[in-house]
Image: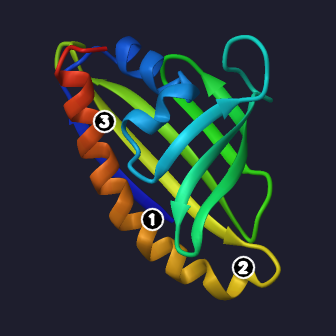
Amino acid sequence: MISNSIEINRRPEEVFAYLDDLGRHHEWQEQIVESRVETEGPTRVGTRAVDKRNVPGGPRDVGYEITEHEPPRLAAFRGTDGPIRPEGRMIVEATGDGASSRVTVELEMRGHGFGKLFAPFARRDAARQITKDQAKLKEVLESGSV
């Protein structure tokens, strides 16, 4: 399991609201070319979305479903298709006087079928990418533009 945390100088409610806007994930995750939410209404357990990601071999649609949703603290998801299916959680905790947040991402890359051969490589790449993406998340949120 990959786990990484970062401190962000924004209130947990603000951080979670931004993370919860699935259509904006491309703003802070560099591998995402575009995101589309396939379920009507606000994000909740059962919400489905698809990210078009730049991955080895070219862009690929990666579908996922929200499996846990406890605003403003926790969201979890699982991949719904493909040879490598991510499962993860994003945990947002108040720090200090509550004006800042700690965002922890936990991620596992599960191989299915021939994907079992590639899962170790996907885990290694994901561990590097999470650090970069969290730095971008911090930059976007602390810039005050959202």
Residue furthest toward the bottom? 117
What residue is rendered at 31% in x and 44% in y?
134
Please tell me which residue is depicted at 53% across the width and 22% down the height of the picture. Answer: 21
Mark 1 residue type: Ala
Spatial CA span between label 2 and label 3 = 29 Å
In the displayed structure, 116 sits above or below 40; it is below
> From the viewer's perspective, is 65 left or right of 133?
right
Front residue of 53/96: it is 53
Residue that numbered label 3 is attached to: 137
Name the quadrant containing residue 82.
bottom right
Left or right: 50, with 94 as reference point: right
Query: Is residue 40 something one can see in this rendering?
Result: yes
Q: Label 2 belongs to which residue? A: 115
Q: Position of residue 74 (x, y in %)?
A: 54, 29
Secondary structure of the residue carrying numbered label 2: helix
**Residue positioned 26% across, 41% down in the render:** 136
